[in-house]
Amino acid sequence: MTVIAVIGGGITGLALAHRLRFRGKDAVLLEAGSRLGGCIETRQRGGFITEIGPNSFLDREPATRELAASVGVEDRIRTADPAAKARYVYTRGRLRSVPASPPAFLKSTILPLGVRLRVVAELFTGPAPQGVDESLGAFGRRHLGHGATEVLLDAVQTGIYAGDMEALSVGATFPQLTKLEREHRSLILGAIRTQKAQRKALPAGAGGSEKLRGALCTFDGGLQTLVDGLARALGPAAHMGAKVEGLQRGNEGWRVSVTENGRQAELLASQVVLATPAYVTAGLVRPLDEQLSALVEGIAYAPIAVVNLGFEPGSTPPPDGFGFLVPGLEKRRLLGAIHVSTVFPFRAEGGRVLYTCMVGGARRPELVKLDEEALVALAREELKELAGVTTSPSFTEVIRWTRGIPQYNVGHLGRVASIDAALARLPGLHLAGNAFKGVGINDCIRNAFALGDALAA
Ligand SMILES: Cc1cc2nc3c(=O)[nH]c(=O)nc-3n(C[C@H](O)[C@H](O)[C@H](O)COP(=O)(O)OP(=O)(O)OC[C@H]3O[C@@H](n4cnc5c(N)ncnc54)[C@H](O)[C@@H]3O)c2cc1C
């Protein structure tokens, strides 16, 4: 009995099951829902291609490219339009463009002069406090000062975690920042040195900083293209409507209890990977190890609502840039908006305009409970006040994620280490997914590949 059961058909489970099969293992994917993709789903309606969850990924993760290539969709990757280069932050009463270089930052009005000068003083930041899992807010204030942290750092985390920067752990959410600090003390110095070294290592004509940052991408049919490619590659090895209800460890391996399309079944597996959300995983491991279950259950999620608003051609001017983010200190109801039709023009037919608005997050969780009509009204009011969009949309769509984005709060790294230690007591059981070591699509795929390779070895 050598079957490996992968439970949960989001991008983590899909990438993992595919990797295992690619490496010659007999992996079976069990997904409770009637479709694969988890948080990823693309819809096509009324001339718009909309996403219910993630919109894009940065093309800088080799595992993501490799996955796309191995399921035959690499040539369907689409890069963001050059018009989407600019990014905006709503601060001090209007949208202000985020400067793209240090000289541009010094000249820009994104922050008042004194606050910009305080950022330059980052060069003289003292060494990091030892053995402390610092919050993102505290880390930011130590390096950049209060003003820049409240505006810029908070905007950046809002775009990824929709979190509360006083609760998030800097080491867990932005490990690249703590690495820069460890190695160079100052983030500015570290960034300059790292970029120099990376540029040197790039072959001539490879595209400089764009190549380093990674271009923003999706697929011609939205992110669903990747999910569909994986579904095709997995074929009958992917079971939908297969809800895992329990796990038991026996002498001969693992017994996985599944309700598949209303029928009870049992699968014997040598290894089991739970690629389910943390709150599902906690329930499944509770009968095996109470302490492990409590650790996993302690991972919080921020609720988030996605409000897609589509406009007929010519009814509203196409917005410039990728979109905008709203830091918490502005006390607005919108977290930010993506100018989807500017970033990926093919996602809005014939010159239509498409905005994806984000509402709620750890800051305003109560807003996600509003009904759809109220969420559309809220998004429209906010778009009007923040971005001057006054016309009525011809298309609206609301998706409410009551448990949307895992929050890597202070203590998360220690929690993950304790989870790993507890798992060592349960040989053959593995946990994966966005709750542990990275929330981005790239993180999920990279971690799935690493686990797949380890299990196949
Ligand atoms: C609104 C939003 C916007 C985002 N934007 C971006 C973005 O632009 N770029 C980016 O890189 N990332 C983004 N993310 C993050 C990214 O989408 C997710 O982290 C990632 O898709 C999670 O994948 P996963 O496979 O780990 O989990 P999930 O997608 O949650 O998959 C878990 C799967 O487990 C299944 N399951 C649950 N219980 C059971 C059970 N008992 N038995 C069997 N199956 C079960 C579920 O049905 C689900 O399919 C966004 C997330 C959200 C919510």
Image (spheres, grey):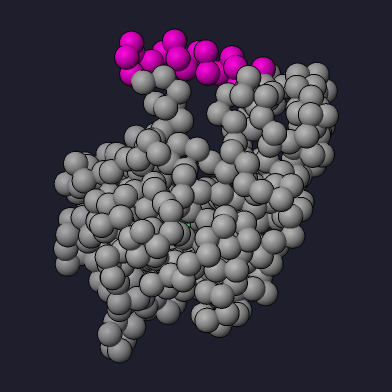
Q: Identify the residue at horizontal 71%, vertical 50% (top origin).
A: 93
Verify whether residue 197 appears in magenta.
yes
Quadrant of the rendered structure where residue 331 is?
bottom right
User: Which segment did they paint magenta?
Assistant: 189-206
Front residue of 105/265: it is 105
Q: Identify the residue at horizontal 44%, vertical 66% (top origin).
A: 308
Front residue of 8/359: it is 359
Quadrant of the snapshot with the C terminus: top left
| Above or below 381: residue 130 | above
Residue 72 screen position, x and y as percent: 16, 46
Locate residue 43 relative to residue 208 in the image: left or right: left
Quadrant of the snapshot with the N terminus: bottom left
Asked whether residue 324 is in view, the answer is yes
| Above or below 329: residue 86 | above
Verify whether residue 309 appears in magenta.
no
Quadrant of the rendered structure where residue 124 is?
top right
Q: Main secondary structure of the magenta part?
A: helix
